[in-house]
Image (tube, helix red, strand yellow):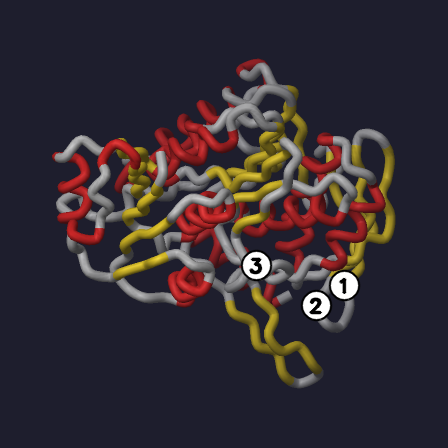
Amino acid sequence: MNTVYFIGIGGIGMSAIARYYKFKGYPVAGYDKTPSELTHALDKEGIDVHYKDDPDYIPKDIASTLIVYTPAIPSDLKELSYVMEHGYTVVKRSRMLGELAEGQACLAVAGTHGKTTTSTLLAHILETSPEGCSAFLGGISNNYGTNFLLNSNDVVVVEADEFDRSFLQLHPQIAAITAMDADHLDIYGDLEHVQQAYREFAGQVSDCLVAKYGLPLDPADFKARIYTYSTTDSRADFHAENLRLSSDGHYTFDLVHPDGVLRDIHVGTLGILNVENGIAAAAVALLHGTSEEAVREAIGTFKGVKRRMEEHVNEPGLTYIDDYAHHPAELAASISTIKE
């Protein structure tokens, strides 16, 4: 393989893999339907992106070209039809991500909402620690200005996406599940099939699974040890105590966990929703062996993810927040957080 060509390169998950191969020294190019801030960033990084569905752009050396595509593109796209008909090696994005994570200590975050912020915070916790990590994220980290981090060690943080059952390509060492609501019903049909896919994902976790308290997961069904987390429910293995809300909407709390209490964690992002995300990320990091001090520092310095409760202005009399929430459960969580 000499060249990697992406069909749908402007997608958040696709662009992270494209950046990985560019960093590794491969010629990388691809198609997307429309220009965006992300495709412009790829251009500046030396990745050739075009916006016309035209097979002439595809490298003609079939034997040495790897094609990566996303199922989000139409099946009748001319470029996709061309590579399928001409014998190229064609790999779906989820399979490619699974292969990149294979053989590494994979820490994954899944959930119908909360997974992007939680996985990005988890990556920040590891980056704050001496260990570091690689990361394939589903949003642009405001701390690093990218959805991709690379480290020479064998620890990788992955956002595990349920779309098209993509997360079933992953076999994490430790994983978190933040929510199992009805979503992507064009693929799953109903809530029961969504939840069944999440149970399949949970069954592929080898060591520890961190699940939001109350999710329909029976510990007897899985080889991984199940831990639960909650913002306030003391029955959960990881939960908050002594919650304090400051006038600017940021919380400070104590994290109760199986080995003790981590006190006075100040949350760098807004609202109770990000306390919950912080507990989930902290649980995965602590189970992985990250120090309490790295966890506390990182939650406090985390600047969030672009368009996820993103705080642009926060001063007396004026607050401006940009949020991407679109699923009903996400909307309810965001609106209640902002009201509080």
Circle 3: residue type: Val
Kindly state the secondary structure of the residue where label 1 is placed: strand
- The residue at the point 63 percent across, 31 percent down is 154
- Residue 280 in view: no
Q: CA distance from mark 3 to mark 2?
A: 17 Å
- Residue 326 in view: yes
Q: Position of 146 compared to 298: left or right? A: left
Q: Position of residue 280 (x, y in %)?
A: 66, 41
Residue at the disc numbered 3? 305
Q: Position of 338 compared to 169: left or right? A: right
Q: Position of 324 compared to 75: left or right? A: right
- The residue at the point 28 percent across, 35 percent down is 189
Q: Position of residue 269 (x, y in %)?
A: 67, 61
- The residue at the point 40 percent across, 34 percent down is 96
Q: Position of residue 311 (x, y in %)?
A: 61, 70
Residue at the disc numbered 1? 245
Q: Are marks 1 and 2 in contact (CB under 8 Å)?
A: yes
Look at discs 3 and 1 and give the one toward the viewer: 3
Say which quarter of the image contains residue 184: top left
Circle 1: residue type: Leu
Residue at the disc numbered 2? 249
Q: Earlier along the polypeptide chain: callout 3 or callout 1?
A: 1
The image shows residue 297, relative to residue 162, as above or below, that is below
Crowding around mark 1 (Cα neighbors within 10 Å: few <14, some 14 to 19, many 20+) is: some
Check the picture and name the quadrant holding the C terminus: bottom right
Circle 2: residue type: Gly
Between residue 266 and residue 207, name the one nearer to us.
207
Q: CA distance from mark 1 to mark 2?
A: 6 Å
